[in-house]
Amino acid sequence: MKFAQILISLLISAPACAGQTWITNVKLVSPEKLDRIESGSVLIENERIVRVERGASGKTPAGATRVDGKGYYLTPGLIDSHVHLYAVPGMSFEQSEHMKSMADAYFAQMPRSYLYYGYTTVIDLAAGSREFIDRVKAMPLHPDIYDCGAPLVIANGYPSAFIAPQKRYQMFTNFIYDPAQKDNIPPEYQPQDYTPAKGVARVKADHAICLKTHYERGFGSQRNLPVMSPEMYGEVRRLARQAGLVMVTHGNSLESQTFAVNGGVEVLAHGMWHWGARNNSKELPEEVRQLLDKVVEKNIGYQPTMQVLYGLRAYVDPDYLNSPALPKLLPPAMLAWLKTPEGNWFKQEVAEEGETDEAVRQGMEAPLRRQRQVVAYLASKNANFLFATDTPSSPTYGNIPGLNGYLEMQNLRNAGLSLEQIFKAATINNARSFHLDQDLGTIEAGKVANLVLMKESPLADVRAYDTVDTVWVRGKPAARASLAASRDR
């Protein structure tokens, strides 16, 4: 008998020991066995699943704590592979520093808000502060957190160009020196210290699992930002592969995604809502189809991030801040502030002066249509969708942790993804694409015990994702009601 078979045999036959939990009377919904949605039980020991029984629920192992799943649906913990933990939705960095007590109250609730909707793992694609992430990891209740370290940006390119020159090099410390811009780079930064090799090495040394890059020429008042050359991008890709880092690239246009796909990207960190000269096309242009076919052929991870645009549109949605979900996810003082004129400050970035709310909504419909068409085409080809929200994508209050994921799932469903595709995107696809599938993404013996108990099946209705009853993070349970924001915390 092989060693692996012996180990599995021992796990199955071993008596329960202290620290074991027996979750029983549940319907098991795991992405690798969607043809077998059946009653069963799961045995957890410490942080891991040690046994999965399918069929009739067996006897509770001696000494194990029995949890009756009430006939509900047990799934792997959900994974959101595009978040920004250090940002406060609805606040600029300056505001969060000025209103520190409000920001601190938000940060104390933020990890619970992800768990409230079943997100037991998040991946921060631009970890701006290692100290901050370590602080979140030290909280009593939080999702598992992975990250891409500091993003590797080109000097004075996106997103650093939107920060004041005197601050951008302190905020975006991991940049590539561009000799063509040497007059615009402070003299204390030497070219030999900011090469692609040094940048990738910094990310690897920071214990990241991925490397975030960008291809973005800009928008608004800045539309001609420097971008990587194909040669530079190719070098970064080669170095990332050598370092075992997943290569992620921000890009939401036909131009940017063409560049990244041709350069060997592994994960595209946005949907495509800009088609350049073909923006006015009502049908999906052939050039877009050909590129998307390459995305499918190369099995590139695709993050639609539809809530980026819908999150901006929240400022012209009179019902958004009155959503019954928000009091459960935000501290009361913060939610009250967001409803004030000061709390609506970011609306001026969304709407032109004098522009009506209806005009803003109409203006956003064209990019939303283009995005839906791209997503629908990829869905028809069963592309490698990765569930990701970009929470928060900007200082918008339209991207609240947890709720943003639930809204994203509704957007994906409306755009043409099947319930099975959404479920796999949020579980096994994310785990595989970010090389976390040894521990996450399915309900199997040996995996980390990140689990979600839902009252309804996610394969029957997208609204099931709002019926979470209990989550387990590394074997520790939390009832959904205990995760809601309250005045007492």
Image: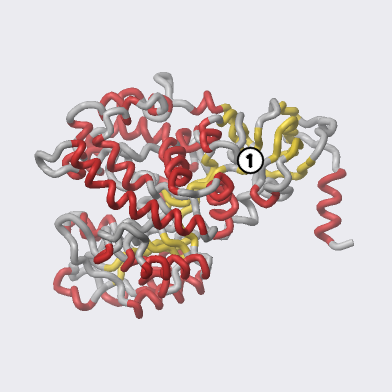
The residue tagged with tag 1: helix, strand or loop? strand
Quarter of the C terminus within the rendering:
top left
At horizontal 22% and vertical 65% (from top left) the residue drawn is 156
363 is higher (above) or lower (below) than 470? below
Residue type at mark 1?
A: Thr
Quarter of the N terminus within the rendering:
bottom right
**View extreme (front): residue:** 282
Q: Which residue is mark 1?
A: 75
Q: Residues within 10 Å of mark 1 (few under 14, many from 20)?
A: many
At horizontal 30% and vertical 30% (from top left) the residue drawn is 101
Quadrant position of residue 382: bottom right
Closer to the camera, 397 or 50? 397
421 is higher (above) or lower (below) than 486? below
Closer to the camera, 313 or 92? 313
**Residue 242 appears at what percent x and percent y?**
51, 74
**Residue 426 appears at what percent x and percent y?**
54, 48
**View extreme (top): residue:** 488
**Residue 266 appears at what percent x and percent y?**
48, 66
At horizontal 47% and vertical 51% (from top left) the residue drawn is 81
Viewed as shown, does residue 301 lie left or right of 343?
right
Q: Is residue 253 visible?
A: yes
Viewed as shown, does residue 193 lie left or right of 384?
left
**Residue 366 appears at what percent x and percent y?**
28, 51
